[in-house]
Image (cartoon, coloured by chain):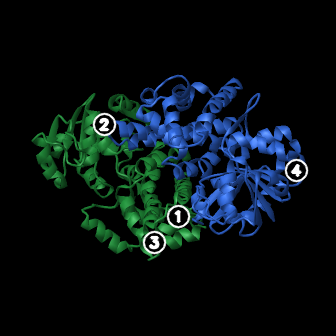
Chain colours: A blue, B green
Amino acid sequence: MKVSILGAGAMGAALTIPYSEKNDVILWGTEFDTAILDKLTKGEEHPRIGAKVAAKEILYPNELDKALDADIILIGVSTEGVMGIFKKIEKNLENQIIITIAKGFIERDEILTIPEAIWEDRRDLKGKIVSVTGPSIAREVAMKLPTHVTYSSVSEKTLDLIKNSLETHFYRIEASRDIIGCEVGSALKNVYSIAISWIRGIESRKNVTMNNLKGIIVSMALREISQMVTAKGGRWKSVYGFTGIGDLIATFRGGRNGMFGELLGKGYDVKSALKELEKRGVGVIEGYTNASRAYRLAEELDERGRLRLEELKLLNGINNVLYHGGNADEVIDALF
Amino acid sequence: MKVSILGAGAMGAALTIPYSEKNDVILWGTEFDTAILDKLTKGEEHPRIGAKVAAKEILYPNELDKALDADIILIGVSTEGVMGIFKKIEKNLENQIIITIAKGFIERDEILTIPEAIWEDRRDLKGKIVSVTGPSIAREVAMKLPTHVTYSSVSEKTLDLIKNSLETHFYRIEASRDIIGCEVGSALKNVYSIAISWIRGIESRKNVTMNNLKGIIVSMALREISQMVTAKGGRWKSVYGFTGIGDLIATFRGGRNGMFGELLGKGYDVKSALKELEKRGVGVIEGYTNASRAYRLAEELDERGRLRLEELKLLNGINNVLYHGGNADEVIDALF
């Protein structure tokens, strides 16, 4: 198969390694990636994964058309960029399978997952859209360390093709029909990671360990995520599998959402926490930009009688801390 | 209420602190606890929790009878000791509520949870038995850090009484009727913790991080635990709540089972791992002694057609490593 990866960030670059085992892989970079593309074309390592990519061809931003000659196209940019890339390639899409790996919501008249936003624009592509979720830290994928993720799609046929062509011994694929549950679950995981990481901040501020509290907050987070997933039409099993728990465990120590949450737990307000992360050179905090969308999604589901927003105590707490000047200690206190 | 705690180990001692908020608490120690009892009667801290106990009275091994004059009796010794203590107090039991906190199985003609073993001997006590599960590290309970655990019993009335008398602001109680699911889930959690901790050992031996693998193994462990819990008549929700996930997160870095698993992952065989732990002064590894019982339980459930043992790949792997000379790398490789 021909596989094109759009976006030369950590995950897009890392996936060239398993994907190239059975396929010809093209890696195309956006205008944000040009410095990296220069390194990669010289055969140097990708700085964010500590490994060389395995692409047959590396393409620059102005060569997008060449990347579209493929059987499988993976859109490997962040949530904010996905629909922009999709608009650019949409007219050339016929039978290609489109894989999306961003974990966030799209804001339209209502809150949509990325596949739903694509379907809204192009009903005919419904069975061609595939979502990747589950524990997958890019650097580990690039090192061929054992990874097992979930690829979901409404089409069994698409899933068969994907599994046959992309699975390797070290990069295993579990197929799921629950694309909505997987998308909602993994986007929410990023949002709830912020609250889970408050505890690390509180621990360091108070110089205590609070493992019992971590156990409680993680259980509560998964319960709320599962309520939202089922209210949105997904399956709770996706949350309690690789997509929810698996990803949560893999990223437990943090990532960007975790760093942000930890600062809030330490006592920073939102503005100063974001400033501190900017100073450290940390990019977009997907959990932060998606938290207000998650809250709006819960409001929509409440209006439709699918759940009761007031029962989602952690989500209300996150919303309170991020947008209404609340602080983490008060929110946690109120849970008890 | 009058509450007696039998066993002056870390957890028994820690529980004097929340329990004494609304009750008169007696702490009785076994012959293994006499050195600790001497400290406690002098008003010194309990060495394993770094805090003074809050008992109104501290009793020595020969004063067990005095401890039985109570409304609630908590048996706070390890699995191996529970039934011995129960035999000693059985004749004096009438209306007392009995709480058990050990997390393991009892081996009789078939594998039983602790409440089932008590019921087998004393059917009349069925509604009086209460099990405690969920994330509860003793030192944190003693420090009044936020803790939320599950108390389970077949009797709603017993649960109401327990919740009313033992719950405090920092020590919250969730009541559950699923005593079998909670008991099986938390005993299995200790067993599976061994396999989860292999990864830390492998990481340190190979000098890599394997967070993706951790995400996979935890998801698989919870799935297998949940299969066994439901096969035994419990509810999967107990596994995916405080009892399973919550406890797993709280004890993620280890405890004794984790230390044992980590050594196996580093390449120690079982004998040398146990020797090394003995050298470090680490006591009984409950997950080890319970792993063979967990396997036997799975065999029983398989024979009764309630599950298929061969599908429990991690449990088979644990059994293989602990009792048949297998090694962790091979087991993990075979999962992929």
Q: Is residue B40 left or right of residue A241?
A: left
Q: Which residue is mark 4?
A: A93
Q: Name the amino acid, label 2.
A: Asn
Q: Is residue A290 left or right of residue B138?
A: right
Q: Are labels 1 and 4 on one chain?
A: no
Measured as percent of width and height from the top left, residue A210 is found at 37, 41
Report the chain holding disc 4: A
On screen, B60 above or below A225? below
Report the chain holding disc 3: B
Rendered-image quadrant of the C terminus of chain B? bottom right
| Residue B107 seen in the current view | no
Residue plotted at (70% across, 39% down): A80
Say the numbered circle drawn on residue B314.
Answer: 1
Q: Are marks 4 and 2 in contact (CB under 8 Å)?
A: no
Q: Nearer the viewer, residue B6 or B35?
A: B35
Measured as percent of width and height from the top left, residue A38 is found at 68, 58
Q: Which residue is mark 2?
A: B95
Q: Which residue is mark 3?
A: B321
Q: CA distance from mark 4 to mark 2?
A: 74 Å
Among numbered discs 1 and 2, the one appearing first in the sequence: 2
Q: CA distance from mark 1 to mark 2?
A: 42 Å
Among numbered discs 1 and 3, the one appearing first in the sequence: 1
Report the chain holding disc 2: B
Q: CA distance from mark 3 to mark 2?
A: 45 Å
Question: How packed is label 3: few (under 14 Cα within 10 Å), some, or many (20 or more)?
Answer: many
Q: CA distance from mark 1 to mark 3?
A: 10 Å
Secondary structure type for disc 1: helix
Q: Name the amino acid, label 1.
A: Leu
Measured as percent of width and height from the top left, residue B110 is found at 44, 62
